[in-house]
Amino acid sequence: MAIRGQVFPEVIRFVCRAFSASRRGGARFFQPILSLLVTAALQVAHAQFAQPGSQGVVQPQPPIQLTQPTITSDTYKGSQVIEKPTPGVLPLSLDDAIARGLKYNLGLILTGQETLGSRGTQLQELQNLLPTATGKLTEAVQQTNLQALGLRGGHFPAIIGPYGYTDLRGTLNWSLLNISSLQNYLASKHNFASSQLSVTDARDMVVLTVGNAYLTCIADQGLIEAAQAQVDTSKISLDQAVANHQAGTAPLLDELRARVDYQTQQQNLISATNTYEKDKIALARAIGLSLEQKFELTDHAPYTALDNLDPDAALRQAITNRYDLKSMQEQVIAAEHSRKAATAERYPAITFDGDYGDIGVNFAHSHGTGNATGSIDFPVFEEAKLRGDAKQAQSQLDQKRAHLSDLGGQIGADVRDSILDIQAAAKQVEVARSNSALAKEALSEAQERYKAGVSDNLAVSQALQSVAQADDQYIASLYQHNIAKLSLARAMGVAASSYKTYVGGK
């Protein structure tokens, strides 16, 4: 353990010479001097150890860095529930749902917290470039057992003390030139900018998630209405078959067939209702509503065409507006600075360390002391570490560049896929609408024929199944069309600002 200054070694040498002289017969002369010098030496040593920044002081360890939770698409399905449920049924529009999602959605909240963490890291890196000043007030009282230290014999007292000192001291540490720390600060600055852009992109993800959940509930309502209509229709057919059988104009088979159709439609209605209630729970989870809160949807999703879509123009707009792409670009720049920081570890670093304070038995008997040190630190033999840091930084940079290139391609694929889905879903809506009308007309015709006794109710049963299938296809095509338009808004980076334009059509 090294001790700064020349005072303590000189005192020790003087004590040793005095002890040798005392053994030659001058014990009574040197004994008080020895006691005084040993006391002074121990006090000086203690003062040297107690100075801030000295090698004898155990420096505090940096705080443990906690791992941030990974944000995935499932994260946006959760929320933070703050509001308590209110009495009655809460009317909920699509705008209300998205507004609540932008306030309480878990994905957006966690992204914002990551931004705060990035800002904290930036400030920590900035501190490495700024001077650090600290102050310390020390009041020490000690007793020393000389025999325990090996100083035994009649010439040494067994116990020295109590003795002490008072020290009021300020220290200054400043890294005057450190290229590696500068590059690390620039990397943290771009990482913070990336996290800020991620928050804006997270808003688009919230709109897509909440909009999808709301449109799913609307589709569920359509399925319930269609299932209820089919139950009502099959009940009419069942009543007619029962009446014909009791009148002796129809066999028991017709009644059994009609009853099976009726119960099948009841099962479909129960299943559709259950799905609707579960999807409402998923919607409430995404927007921060309490699960005890009752609510009803006030918006519907009628079919509105979105025409004149130009994939190239949409892609150019997406490249301009997508904040996740801008965020990844900032991450690439940050990785480049981290790579430069790893290279700069080989460069010399110029630092200044100084302290000044007042030390003595007390403030009435004290004197100012100080220390100023300038140093140039440079690695001599750390080749394995330096090469390892450089390779790790280069690997991170290559990964970020690969992700950036892939994200650009993914954005193009998202835009073109959404446009293709919109065009296909629009055609499916038209075909499904026509198919539903034809199926209902066929059902009416079959019911009239059965009522007139021209045929049995097998045609009615088949027509009921065709109507149910046509209604399901129509509702599914409407849902796919609206989701495709919302996905296009997300792909173009305008979901948070212009979702109504796309979901409602242009």
Image (tube, helix red, strand yellow):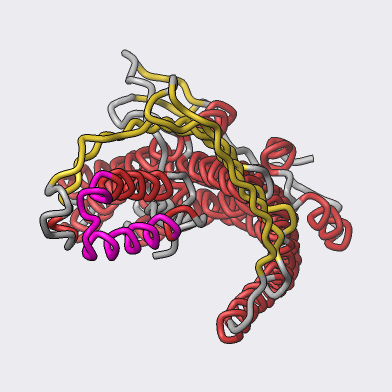
Main secondary structure type of the part rendered in magenta: helix
- Residue 388 picture location, percent across and down: 58, 82
Residue drawn at point x = 69 percent, y = 75 percent: 346
Number of numbered discs visible in the structure rendering:
0
Q: Which segment is the magenta one? A: 10-32
Instruction: Pick whichever, 67 or 437, lies toward us.
Output: 67
Name which quarter of the figure residue 384 lies in: bottom right
Residue drawn 73% across the image and 55% down it: 186
Is 22 inside the magenta-drawn segment?
A: yes
Q: Nearer the viewer, residue 14 or 364?
A: 14
Taking 306 as reference, is 18 left or right?
Answer: left
The answer to if 150 sits in the magenta stretch is: no
On the image, the x and y values in percent for residue 132 come to: 60, 42
Q: Is residue 249 above or below residue 95?
A: below
Quadrant containing the N terminus is: bottom left
Can residue 325 be seen here? The reply is no
The residue closer to the viewer here, 463 or 1, is 1
Residue visible at 59% across and 55% down in the picture: 432
Which image quarter holds the C terminus? Answer: top right
Whether 394 is drawn above or below 260: the answer is below
Q: 201 above or below 419?
A: above
- Taking the image as shown, residue 505 lies to the left or right of residue 381, namely right
Could you tell me residue 207's position as x and y percent?
Answer: 59, 41
